[in-house]
């Protein structure tokens, strides 16, 4: 059997699909993962994935491309070339799987499974309804089981073994602070992040600050003269290695929170309630959730904070973070 799993969202979303991918891989001869460009680096870290197809879907992402017939035709041809017998279309709780299912059907995939509240017509062979409050990783596992791929392990997030990063970080046991987020409403303020680095250093913690190539100014500011600035210096696999060597990670609801969980590192989660924590919190590792989950922005899925002053997160202090780190490091 040749299987295809589709998850067309961001880096963290693809990591959350990992347990379901492993369930599929346990029964399939090959697994192709179809993902978006932001999710591709995560897809290449997942155990069980044999091939990665990358496509920027016009219904996904923050800046979706225009619909172009030639790109649709190219995708259908690429999926047909995988000769997949069966497919899982993984989506977030608020998304429809039907556009992707239609394209997979056009590509000749004979059996397609997805969570769908909308009537699917002939697009789905397995129409599953997710549990109302399921975490995204659990929802994907539940769908895989409904499609005939029961879980084969503890269901935690995992990635392939990361490369050694001692030359970047020094000895293990530091605290990672990751100040950036793909959605501004989910980010703690740079000022608060910089205060946290100073307070963690004053408490005797070594601090490593991480971020992407476009976040170098942010990570330099947050690290100051008390943290090690690795902004723009790691790819996805190296970032996994940095997080694996950490005693704890401090980050918002963004991809590195899930990458930390995938390498078994506890997480201090600065979680803006624009999406529900029950579905997106760090999964399978010890964590402390900080941020007012009953703030007026709760459940809005806002990308820019709709409340002046960003109180859901900026009422969290640097000392709150230090206390949370102390709690998690003691537990670990």
Image: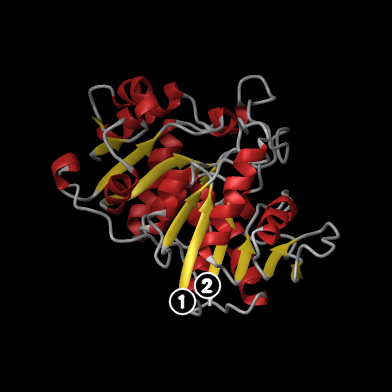
Rendering quarter of residue 331: bottom left
At x 67% / y 70%, what residue is drawn? 110
Rendering quarter of residue 133: bottom right
Q: Mark number for residue 2?
A: 2
Q: Position of residue 225 (x, y in %)?
A: 23, 23
The C terminus, quarter of image: bottom left
Residue 203 seen by the camera: no
Secondary structure beneath label 1: loop
At x 54% / y 69%, what residue is drawn? 3
In the image: residue 275, left or right of residue 21 = right
Q: Nearer the viewer, residue 206 or 300?
A: 300
- N-terminal label among 1 and 2: 2
Q: Nearer the viewer, residue 211 or 84?
A: 84
Residue 200 vs 147, above or below: the answer is above
Residue 192 vs 32, above or below: the answer is above
Residue 260 vs 38, above or below: the answer is below
Q: Which residue is mark 1?
A: 29
Q: Position of residue 166 (x, y in %)?
A: 16, 47
Real-space CA distance between mark 1 and mark 2, rounded to the nearest whole angstrom: 6 Å
Q: Position of residue 324 (x, y in %)?
A: 42, 46
In the image: residue 300, left or right of residue 230 = right
At x 41% / y 64%, what residue is drawn? 50
At x 31% / y 45%, what residue is drawn? 239
Asked if the residue at tag 2 contacts the one at tag 1, i.e. Cβ–Cβ closer than 8 Å, the answer is yes
């Amino acid at each position: 059997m040749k299987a295809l799993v589709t998850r067309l969202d961001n880096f963290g979303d693809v990591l959350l699909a990992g347990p379901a991918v492993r369930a599929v891989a346990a029964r399939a001869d090959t697994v192709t993962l179809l993902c978006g460009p932001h999710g591709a680096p995560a897809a290449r870290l997942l155990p069980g994935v044999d091939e990665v197809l990358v496509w920027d879907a016009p219904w996904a992402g923050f800046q979706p491309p225009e619909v172009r017939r030639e790109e649709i035709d190219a995708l259908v041809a690429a999926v047909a070339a995988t000769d997949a017998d069966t497919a899982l279309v993984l989506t977030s709780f608020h998304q429809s799987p039907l556009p992707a299912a239609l394209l997979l059907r056009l590509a000749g995939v004979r059996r397609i499974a997805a969570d769908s509240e909308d009537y699917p017509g002939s697009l789905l062979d397995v129409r599953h309804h997710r549990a109302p409050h399921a975490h995204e990783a659990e929802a994907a596992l539940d769908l895989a089981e409904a499609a005939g791929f029961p879980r084969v392990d503890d269901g935690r997030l995992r990635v392939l073994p990361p490369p050694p990063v001692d030359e970047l970080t020094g000895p293990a046991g530091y605290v990672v602070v990751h100040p950036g987020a793909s959605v501004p409403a989910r980010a703690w303020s740079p000022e608060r992040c910089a205060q946290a680095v100073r307070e963690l250093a004053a408490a005797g913690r070594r601090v490593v600050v991480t971020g992407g190539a476009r976040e170098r100014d942010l990570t330099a500011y947050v690290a100051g003269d008390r943290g090690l600035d690795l902004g723009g210096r790691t790819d996805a696999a190296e970032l996994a290695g940095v997080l694996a060597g950490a005693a704890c990670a401090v980050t918002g609801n963004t991809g590195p929170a899930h990458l930390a969980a995938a390498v078994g590192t506890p997480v201090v989660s600065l979680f803006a309630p624009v999406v529900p924590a029950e579905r997106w919190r760090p999964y399978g590792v010890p964590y402390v959730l900080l941020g007012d989950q009953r703030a007026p922005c709760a459940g809005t899925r806002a990308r820019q904070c709709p409340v002046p002053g960003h109180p859901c997160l900026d009422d969290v202090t640097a000392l709150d973070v230090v206390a949370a780190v102390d709690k998690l490091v003691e537990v670990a």
